[in-house]
Amino acid sequence: MARGGRWRFIVVVLPHLSIGARLFPRPTRVTWVNGIAHLEEHMADPTFIIATVFGNVPVDYCHNPSSMTTESDYIGFLKDGLQASTHQWGRITPEVDTLVDHLRIALREVGKHGRVIHICHSQGSVITWLAAKRLDSDECKRIEIISFGGAATITTQEFPFARCINYYAVNDPILNVVPSAVKALRSGYLFGGGLGEQEIIFLSSRTGDPVSD
């Protein structure tokens, strides 16, 4: 998916707040971590879009650094992909430790009754999956996960997060390396997080082209 387009469809996660939640909002922080091929200069636009979707709230990003030095650095892109594949095998890297620290700082800021909404994309999702293994149960219970095109699915069956939603485009090439998502797509079975909520959701293609989608 093109970098600009991949963040525009985030409007599907706009929260539907109850009247009580609007009158008595709990302390909340919104954070996100990127996938491969994001230089530091690429972080501003998605952060602005996410902030807009959530009502112009402050959004903190945790930059997953890229090996790319320019947008045309294909060697760096391949290195990013190789690192992401090692994450899928469970390798802990400094990026994972940085995200654990990032989430714990956000949790401290909202307090024990607050909530952290954490958004992750592509490699950022598998980094989040690894970071979750470092978080304790009480920490997870105060975090909601929203994943887009994740290189790993994150579900409440595996971690005691308050909520997990994994979005995939049906033609996303990432599905080739995420067996759990492929199984859900083929079987029509969507993992539930209680109250009938679906945790793996497939979005139809808008153009037929996975790059532009």
Image (spheres, rainbow, N blue to C red):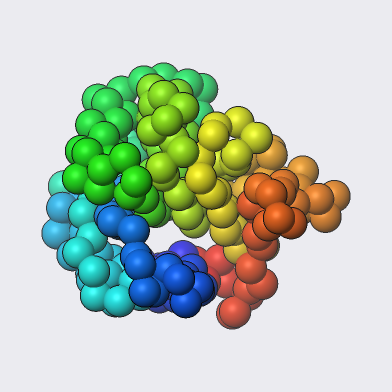
- Residue at 55% x, 32% y: name it: 159
Dividing the picture into quarters, in which one does residue 130 lie? Answer: top left
Q: In this view, does 121 lie above or below 154?
A: below
Out of 192 and 141, give the one closest to the viewer.
Answer: 141
- Residue at 38% x, 33% y: name it: 139
Task: Give percent across and percent down for residue 148.
Answer: 49, 56
Task: Using the rendered image of the protein, determine whether residue 203 is visible from the camera's viewpoint.
Answer: yes
Q: Would you say 142 lies left or right of 31 here?
A: right
Task: Give percent across and percent down for residue 196.
Answer: 74, 56
Task: Give percent across and percent down for residue 71.
Answer: 23, 57
Q: Would you say 208 lies left or right of 192 here?
A: left
- Residue at 66% x, 72% y: name it: 204
Task: Give percent across and percent down for residue 173.
Answer: 58, 53
Dividing the picture into quarters, in which one does residue 10 lie? Answer: bottom left
- Residue at 21% x, 54% y: name it: 60
Instruction: Report the number of numbered marks.
Output: 0
Out of 190 and 127, give the one closest to the viewer.
Answer: 190
Task: Using the rendered image of the protein, determine whether residue 35 is visible from the camera's viewpoint.
Answer: no
Q: Would you say 200 lies left or right of 91 here?
A: right
